[in-house]
Amino acid sequence: MTIRTFGIDHVHFNVLRIRRFLEIMEQLFGADITPISQLAQLGAYNACVHFPAEGMTPSFLDVFQPGGDSDQAAEHIRDHGQGISHVAFRVENIEDAAVHAANCGLRELSRLGYRGMKQVQFDTRAELGFLLEFVEYEPGFAEDLARVKERLRAGETVDGLRYVSP
């Protein structure tokens, strides 16, 4: 058995200057960038960078800046420098993918995800140089996410997430 994947869904970047990172992506690619948000559960700042594309939802960059000295982004930068920490693959069936990865000897770290987005992370830094993540979207995810973004733009905090910049 192998895992049925649709390819890379997103890549996590940890940086010291998120505004500069986003500015460069916008200047180079005309990227669609979400406002910078603060993620209470991770203690970090975050923005997503989407690139103009047609068809299936394209891959995106999930960018994090430490919000303190002890959050995951700060630990990654301290231990490995700025750069990629996770590579997430979109899979057809996350439960089957997780079982297969475990059978291949990979150790599950967490199932930290977001509403409508199932995720599982594996400790593969020593073997792959990054943490491996699988993602499966529930039906209606894109529509629900659009509604959440509207609420965030209106100043609400949703699931511990709030926009801190326009």
Image (cartoon, rainbow, N blue to C red):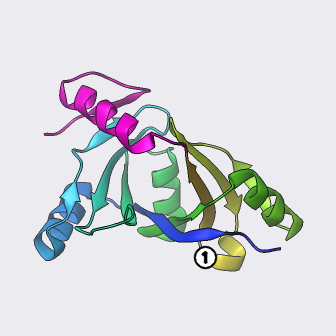
* Label 1 secondary element: loop
Report which quarter residue 15 is drawn in.
bottom left
> Which residue is rendered at x = 41% and y = 68% of the image?
82
Is 161 a magenta residue?
yes
Spot occupied by residue 105 in the image (x, y as percentages of width and height) = 86, 68
* Image height of 160 relative to 37, above or below: above
Give the residue number, with chain letter if any, for mark 1.
129
* 18 on left or right of 59: left
Front residue of this view, candidates 101 and 142: 142
The amino acid at mark 1 is Gly
Where does the magenta region start and end?
138-166
Residue found farthest to the top: 156
Spot occupied by residue 164 in the image (x, y as percentages of width and height) = 22, 35
Front residue of this view, candidates 47 and 129: 47
Is 83 a magenta residue?
no
Report which quarter residue 14 is drawn in.
bottom left
Please state, as top left, top right, bottom left or bottom right, where the C terminus lies in the image. top left
Please state, as top left, top right, bottom left or bottom right, where the N terminus lies in the image. bottom right
* Image height of 159 relative to 107, above or below: above
* Image height of 99 relative to 70, above or below: below
> Which residue is rendered at x = 17% and y = 39% of the image?
165
> Which residue is rendered at x = 62% and y = 59% of the image?
134
* 75 on left or right of 52: right
How many callouts does the rendering have? 1
Spot occupied by residue 96 in the image (x, y as percentages of width and height) = 78, 57
* Image height of 41 relative to 78, above or below: above
> Which residue is rendered at x = 66% and y = 70% of the image?
125
